[in-house]
Amino acid sequence: MCNIEVMCIGSFGRYTRPKCNLILLIILQLGLHTVEGVWPLPQSFTSSTERYPLNPNAFYFGYGRQSAAQQDCSVLDAAFKRYFSLIFPDYTSGYGVLRFSGDKPFTVEIRVDHADCDSYPNENSSERYNLSVSAGQASLNAETVWGALRGLETFSQLVYQDDFGTYFVNKTEIDDFPRFQFRAILLDTSRHYLPVQAILKTLDAMAYSKFNVFHWHIVDDPSFPYQSRTFPDLSSKGAFHPMTHIYTQSDVRRVISHARLWGIRVLPEFDSPGHTQSWGKGQSDLLTPCYRGSTPSGTFGPVNPVLPSTYQFMARLFKEVSSVFPDSYIHLGGDEVDFSCWKSNPDVRAFMQKMGFGGDFTKLEAFYMEKIVNITSALNKTSIVWQDVFDYHERIPKDTVLHIWKGTPASYKEELSRMTKAGMRVLLAAPWYINHIAYGQDWRNYYTVQPLNFSGTEEQKKLVIGGEVCMWGEYVDATNLTPRLWPRASAAAERLWSDEKQTSSVDEAFPRLQDFRCKLVRRGIRAEPLHVGHCKHEYQGV
Amino acid sequence: MLLAGRPPVLGLYRLSTTDMIAALKLTLLLLALAFSQGQQHNYIDELDEEAGTVRAVQASQYVSLWPLPQKVKISDISFKLTSFNIVDAKESSAGPSCSLLQDAYRRYYEYMFGSAKRQGPRKSRRTGPSELTKLQVWITSPDSECDGYPSVTSDESYELSVDLPYAVLKAPKVWGALHGLETFSQLVYEDEYGAKSINSTAISDFPRFAHRGILLDSSRHFLPLKVILANLETMAMNKFNVFHWHIVDDQSFPYLSRTFPQLSQQGAYHPYTHVYTPADVKMVIEFGRLRGIRVIPEFDTPGHTQSWGKGQKDLLTPCYSGSKPSGSFGPVNPILNTTYDFMSQFFKEISTVFPDAYVHLGGDEVDFTCWKSNPDIQKFMDQQGYGDDYKKLESFYIQKLLDIVTTTHKGYIIWQEVFDNGVKLKPDTLIHVWKGNQEQYQSEMANVTSAGYQTLLSTPWYLNRISYGQDWRGHYKADPQDFNGTEEQKKLVIGGEACLWGEYVDATNLTPRLWPRASAVAERLWSAKEVTDISDAFNRLSVHRCRMVARGIPAEPLFSSYCPREYKGI
């Protein structure tokens, strides 16, 4: 029964790197696994069958002598602690720790060029690293601590256990960097409240797939869970519950600092002028009163763009937001504005007349968005807006980033062309609306997206700064978020990190992703299965 | 227990739609659970959702009862529950020795009052006039069936009266009492500060169908025991009463057989970590029994048996390519005597391990290509005069298998193909319908029942098939008696099962994928046929799902909204 299959496959770089050797994958039927790969696939990866046992009692992380960062580097010290447990999952439970007195010590030596230990990752942070594993040691070199974090993740995925619980790592050379600088996950905490624990767990899993931006769609129509210091009524009246379903300032700080330690930026979105029903509960006169005939109907529409008080409120709110969230980007939304309420309101119509907008309400929206973008520019923040804003209004400030969320592949490619031709930077989310579920292996669709396959010059292609996986919250809360997100989002993670030519085969990716999903499960992430099969260590919760 | 207040509605409601609509108009909306208008970035929604769908969760006159009892009368007189106990009625035929009930009392006490310390009766303290201090449970028939197993003929009815001086739950058997306790717990609600109350209520209840099942598949993915037990627990909250355990299949054989231990030794994903030992199986059966749930195992043959072949030589048919064995195997080999010797011993074991009167024998999706390729089978076909009709060979196998199972004194359930292929069946065979579109399954139900067989429906309830949006609405609308047939034929429909096949499901996602979608099926199988108001169902089901979440079950949301107590796991 001990049926040993030996198969040879080309090393991961076989399309582009003639120097790579063949590697052997030995798969024992009883789930004993050796190196099945790293997810997302590094840019350059060479590994041999030579392997070294690792003994948790003789395993060390160290700072290289030339490293700019040394002991007390908060980011790396915290990472060593985390990765020790991830590399040796049995260790703390005391199971499977076999001591071979003959085991030599093994050291992972880190060297970084910049001691950016107390900063936040930003859009220019280098995440490049190289990792060389040889007898008794691994050298991990990176320009920044953020690159070192990516390298530690890769190293942790190289370590495996044999059937007797002994840990091994193979001789390996890796040179790696991301294809796109912006690789994000959007969570929606308005349609359902997500407990802070669920957010933190998602940040952990993001780091395992090398995502680096958490796009926090924190408020929307259904609820306003962000507890503002300036306008506390927004959450006390607009949250699902004023005490239990809010994010306090310290919750937000906790999310930001947890994210920082994993090298993840936190990008807040305060979407307006649409999607703001919940704002109106705690801020009177902010929303447009809708009219039926000549009298107010009692319902409200988008933010009222004709009152000066609106902009005073927004300036104060965004001043707070820009000091609470350290990232230099703010997402301003701007999508799906329903004009029917504006149309019904006589004051809005009078304003339209005065401004010479005629009957074109897209001009009114553009007027509003321009004022909001100016508010955030004055706060030294760069704005990101949904594509609708560009569609209405092509002359928005050049440093604004446009976020594509709509349409079929043909139409988003067209949009990519148009936007980059206008010289705008672009983020792509349309193919990764992961809240839309379907029966079967839909991860294959997320994997085969080609973000740069649109008509445009090389210069235009460079304006695509990355992509984003969106998990909108209509049907998602803490009960089902994790299995819906993982490992489906990991498919997009590889598309955004790895070389497209080396990762063009979805069938070759399949066993590696299966193996990666079992690693996630082993790490306590409820990542759902891709198809029939099993993990050596199944999920132990309910 | 999750509502901050409740609508004061009086009157007895025979459940007609007009009454419900009228009453809804009167209902005060004391609690709007959700407020949701925008649909950011979900242009698909607009295509999916029906026009006029009520989106906000509103209070139902039946509050949070799920599945809805046959007769309910809730008044606006409320009682406080500060010092409360569940006790046996003096006249009850089940006393303190009935551990099934004692267990259930504790379980429901904890659901209702959480980890709050159990308060003993404090004699010194005067209880107020509006305080309810106990629920008496009264098993009325001389045999409570406390130590028995539930069966398809078990009496599950109960009557519940919540009034002063104490509430009374009357049921002929313990099975009805279990359902009544669940219903009682659903009537309890709490205010903003956690104080519990219950309204004066009269309920008379019984299930519409006797067989209300959930199928879990532990072969395509192994399901840890914990997951199975948690789902039995959730089944009880939804008044399901059958766990159909599709325990083995092509992919793996996790059932550890005492007679043939090599089946799991060789056929499981892992011989130690991915198996169900006899003790595990016993635990599942007893855990189910304590909740009034039958455990019906399925050992599907002659197809779906790849994993069996690993531990049992010569059981499967060797496939040929040309004149030589190809090395691969097909369905069970129906022409060898050893096959039937094996099956006799195997099903003898199964009949002793699983106490239920029924065993599910599968019989679906037999692929004939391997049989066709095998020269010995071809010879046998000639001898028997079957010509090229492999359905006859399948029938030959199934008939021998049914004879074997009959000798173990078990009844059997088989998938519809066995009936479609004209196999001779005992008149008490249950035919399980799973194929086709609505028109096809309805005509199958008509055919099966006109042939006089009892039937179970699963086709509209393949919950493993997921899609974006509120697909529970489709599950809710399907009705197993909705086909052309006589009243007599309709009576042969004994129920249905929601199936969660395991291709894409394991411990990581099973529970949120199953619940509350299966709850929609639960109400269809329990409540009166006329209970079809989908917006009232949405309101009750939203609260019911939050109740499951509060009890630690990660049941997924129906739509944008919130629960007072969100899921605490991750």
Image (cartoon, coloured by chain):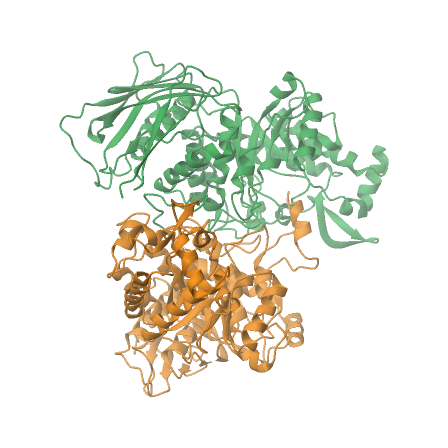
Chain colours: A green, B orange
- Residue A206, given in percent of the width and then of the height, sits at 45, 35
Residue lying at 60% horizontally and 49% vertically, measured from the top left: A222
Residue lying at 63% horizontally and 57% vertically, measured from the top left: B55
Is residue A55 positioned above or below B9 on the image?
above
Determine which quarter of the picture holds residue B383. bottom left
- Residue A323, given in percent of the width and then of the height, sits at 53, 30
Determine which quarter of the picture holds residue A149. top left
Does residue A326 appear left or right of residue A31 in this picture? right
- Residue B339, given in percent of the width and then of the height, sits at 32, 61
- Residue A165, given in percent of the width and then of the height, sits at 23, 37
Is residue A257 positioned above or below B484 on the image?
above
Determine which quarter of the picture holds residue A442. top right
Residue lying at 41% horizontally and 23% vertically, measured from the top left: A11
Image quarter where the N terminus of chain A lies is top left
Q: Nearer the viewer, residue B31 or B317?
A: B317
Q: How many numbered circles are shown?
A: 0
Question: What residue occupies the far top of the structure in this picture?
Answer: A66
Does residue B226 appear left or right of residue B1 in this picture? left
Q: Nearer the viewer, residue B191 or A408?
A: A408
Q: Nearer the viewer, residue A343 or A134?
A: A134
Does residue B249 appear left or right of residue A351 in this picture? left
Q: Is residue B193 visible?
A: no
Is residue B148 positioned above or below A368 on the image?
below
Is residue A111 positioned above or below B98 on the image?
above
Q: Is residue A241 visible?
A: yes
Q: Nearer the viewer, residue A513 or B83?
A: A513
